[in-house]
Image (cartoon, rainbow, N blue to C red):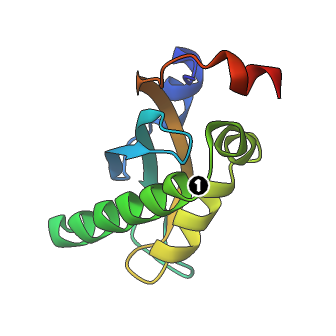
Amino acid sequence: MNFTTDKLRSLVRKWQTLIEAHVDVKTTDNYTLRMFCIGFTKRRPNQVKRTCYAQSSQIRQIRRKMREIMTAQATSCDLKELVQKFIPEMIGKEIEKATSSIYPLQNVFIRKVKILKAPKFDLGKLME
């Protein structure tokens, strides 16, 4: 699963901080995935300044929170359920909500998911 290049380019803008995080997770059905997350800082309500740059300590905290949420979401379900979570951008919304106390974010998405290791193909499981 991947974001298209034009969608990714349309999100990146000046005067805001881009925050990326990635994590390797194992689902309940033994798929090993690498999930990539992207998010952008948002101007606070009634902010006068035009820029909305986060400090490096805030970026580290946000990245840690992103990793925690992605790991928690992926390890608790199998691949099919995880794909169902990607479709309505559920994980991105949860990250947005959790990090709003550190720095408000916008356009938080799981931008890419790679399958690093798939379990051995089991014919018996397929017949169920």
Residue 48, quarter of picture: bottom left
- The residue lying at 53 percent from left, 42 percent from top is 110
Image spot of residue 121 (x, y percent):
56, 16
Q: Is residue 47 visible?
A: yes
User: Please, which residue is most extreme toward the front here?
Assistant: 124
- The residue lying at 57 percent from left, 23 percent from top is 1
Q: Residues within 10 Å of mark 1 (few under 14, many from 20)?
A: many
Q: Is residue 99 left or right of residue 64?
A: right
Q: How many marks?
A: 1
Viewer-nearest residue: 41 or 70: 70
| Mark 1: secondary structure | helix
Identify which amino acid the numbered label 1 is placed on.
Gly
Q: Is residue 113 left or right of residue 1?
A: left
Image spot of residue 86 (x, y percent):
67, 42
Q: Is residue 58 left or right of residue 33?
A: left
Viewer-nearest residue: 109 or 127: 127
Viewer-nearest residue: 77 or 22: 77
Mark 1, residue position:
92
Is 52 located above or below residue 108 in the figure? below
Image spot of residue 60 (x, y percent):
21, 65
- The residue lying at 62 percent from left, 52 percent from top is 77
Is 106 located above or below residue 57 in the figure? above
